[in-house]
Image (cartoon, rainbow, N blue to C red):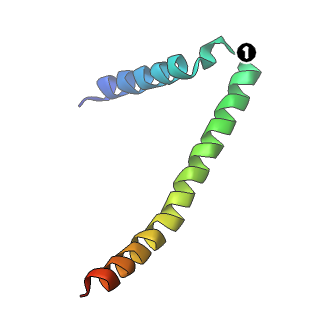
């Protein structure tokens, strides 16, 4: 994939994001606040998943190992 097509694809994804969230109708300062809040929420979800999902998978594995025997 060449650089121009990659750049166009990223612009297209950003345009889709603006359309889906309807943030294109906001004023610039409102857009920056909206994007900041959105990025913060996504970062917290990713961090929480990174921290807690492995623990829950291990606990589920131990639980089912005790039930079905190993």
Q: Nearer the viewer, residue 56 or 18?
A: 56
In the image, is residue 60 above or below residue 23?
below
* Rendered image quadrant of residue 8: top left
Name the image quarter holding the N terminus.
top left
Judge the density around disc 1: few (<14), some (14-19), many (≥20) Cα neighbours within 10 Å.
few
Name the image quarter holding the C terminus.
bottom left
Q: Is residue 28 left or right of residue 19?
A: right
Q: Is residue 19 left or right of residue 23?
A: left
In the image, is residue 20 above or below residue 66?
above
Q: Secondary structure at mark 1?
A: loop
* Rendered image quadrant of residue 38: top right
Which residue appears at 72% of the width and 19% of the height? 28
In the image, is residue 38 above or below residue 31?
below
Which residue appears at 39% of the width and 73% of the height? 60
Q: Nearer the viewer, residue 44 or 9?
A: 44
User: Residue 14 location, x and y as percent?
Assistant: 48, 24
User: Residue 53 location, x and y as percent?
Assistant: 46, 64
Which residue appears at 65% of the width and 11% of the height? 25
- Which residue appears farthest toward the front when viewing the image? 67
- Which residue appears farthest toward the bottom when viewing the image? 70
User: Residue 36 location, x and y as percent?
Assistant: 68, 37
Q: Is residue 15 left or right of residue 64?
A: right
Number of numbered discs present? 1
* Rendered image quadrant of residue 7: top left
Which residue appears at 32% of the width and 23% of the height? 4
> Which residue is labeled 1 in the image?
27
- Which residue appears farthest toward the right when viewing the image? 29
């Amino acid at each position: 994939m060449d650089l121009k097509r990659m750049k166009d694809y990223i612009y297209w994804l950003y345009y889709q994001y603006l359309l889906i969230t309807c943030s294109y109708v906001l004023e610039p300062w409102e857009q920056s606040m909206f994007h900041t809040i959105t990025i913060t929420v996504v970062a917290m979800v990713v961090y929480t998943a990174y921290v807690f999902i492995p623990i829950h998978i291990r606990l589920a594995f131990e639980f089912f190992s005790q039930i079905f025997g190993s």
